[in-house]
Image (cartoon, rainbow, N blue to C red):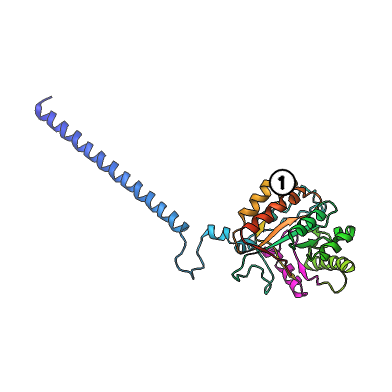
């Protein structure tokens, strides 16, 4: 090979090397640009609109911490819990703090005060309700009890004692059979009326029994006809925006109940969901500490109406 041929070969190798480097650089730059575009798209999708009037704002964290927004998104689990409280089938929605009320009846309305409404569902029970009443009496505070008609029939003296101590009695349906009551709005109202008949026979016809709590909560599009049927017949309803988590299962450790109650206690007005069914023994045990916590935070205790 002559020197001239060698020089030509070197130049070819050099040119090919330059071309390879250029192609690599172009490809690398293209990958970075594409990656940046994808990142920007993701950021734009996650970003929250700065325009308060932008209804397309997608601030998921805000929606998950606002109980009223949560309430509109929850679904109803139509499993039928055992009225004794021993059922392993628990309404999952009761494990999430949500808020919902009838229009014109809003315990969450801001008025500059810190108020907590202690509420107990699914009673009365012979083993737990008397102990809860003793604790409330000890602290000189009142609560709201949402009673199942079947349980009230079996514990008439406890229903009378709840009212005599100044607590408020609410309607939690007669059967608490969610597959049955949520099959049709008319069926739901029949169960409400049946519970009211039982409670009126115990408390007297003059006792105001227009306060209702839906088993599992009133939220969700599916229950809109049921809400309309209820309010159309002169009743009002209240869900909750705090809870102790005793709906999760039976015998929830006391410290867990206290922790969960504190976790959701982020508002000046709190409606706390608890249960006094027979199996909710640890709810009774946790109650004094829960009361002490709210007292230490400057809350006053009131009843729903």
Q: Quadrant of residue 242?
A: bottom right
Asked whether residue 244 is in view, the answer is no
* Relative horizontal placement of residue 59, taking residue 103 as reference (left or right): left
Most foreground residue, 87 or 40: 87
Q: Residue at x 84, y 65 (%)?
A: 195
Q: Provide the secondary structure element on which disc 1 rests.
A: loop
How far from the left and from the top, in percent, is residue 100? 67, 65
Tell me residue 138's x, y (percent): 76, 57
Q: Could you tell whether 266 is left or right of 93 in the image?
A: left
Q: Compare residues 37 and 242 and report the one nearer the observer.
A: 242
Q: Does the segment drawn in magenta span residue 228? A: yes
Residue in view at x 82 percent, y 60 percent = 148
Q: Position of residue 15 (x, y in %)?
A: 19, 38
Residue 113 in magenta?
no
Q: Which residue is mark 1?
A: 252
Horizontally, residue 292 falls left or right of residue 64, namely right
Q: Can residue 19 be seen in this snapshot?
A: yes
Residue that sits furthest to the top in the current view: 1
Along the line of sight, the residue nearer the viewer: 245 or 90: 245
Q: Quadrant of the C terminus?
A: bottom right
Badge 1 density bin: few <14, some 14–19, many ≥20, Cα 10 Å: some
Magenta span of residues = 208-235
């Amino acid at each position: 090979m002559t020197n001239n041929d060698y020089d030509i070969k070197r130049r070819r190798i050099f040119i090919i090397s330059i071309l390879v480097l250029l192609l690599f650089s172009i490809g690398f730059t293209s990958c970075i640009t594409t990656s940046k575009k994808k990142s920007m798209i993701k950021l734009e999708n996650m970003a929250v609109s700065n325009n308060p009037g932008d209804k397309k704002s997608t601030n998921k964290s805000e929606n998950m911490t606002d109980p009223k927004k949560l309430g509109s998104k929850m679904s109803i689990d139509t499993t039928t819990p055992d009225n004794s409280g021993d059922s392993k089938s628990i309404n999952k929605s009761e494990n999430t703090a949500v808020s919902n009320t009838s229009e014109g009846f809003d315990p969450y309305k801001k008025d500059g005060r810190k108020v907590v409404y202690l509420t107990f569902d699914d009673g009365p029970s012979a083993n737990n309700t008397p102990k809860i009443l003793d604790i409330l009496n000890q602290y000189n505070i009142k609560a709201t009890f949402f009673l199942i008609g079947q349980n009230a029939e079996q514990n008439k003296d406890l229903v009378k004692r709840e009212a005599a101590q100044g607590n408020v009695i609410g309607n939690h349906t007669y059967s608490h059979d969610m597959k049955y009551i949520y099959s049709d709005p008319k069926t739901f109202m029949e169960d409400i009326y049946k519970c009211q008949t039982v409670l009126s026979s115990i408390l007297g016809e003059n006792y105001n029994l227009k306060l209702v709590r839906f088993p599992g909560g009133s939220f969700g599009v599916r229950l809109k006809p049921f809400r309309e049927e209820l309010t159309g017949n002169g009743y009002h309803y209240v869900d909750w925006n705090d809870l102790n988590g005793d709906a999760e299962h039976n015998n929830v450790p006391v410290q867990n109940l206290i922790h969960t109650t504190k976790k959701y206690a982020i508002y000046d007005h709190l409606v706390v969901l608890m249960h006094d069914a027979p199996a909710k023994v640890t709810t009774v045990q946790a109650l004094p500490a829960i009361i002490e916590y709210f007292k230490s935070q400057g809350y006053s205790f009131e009843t729903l109406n």
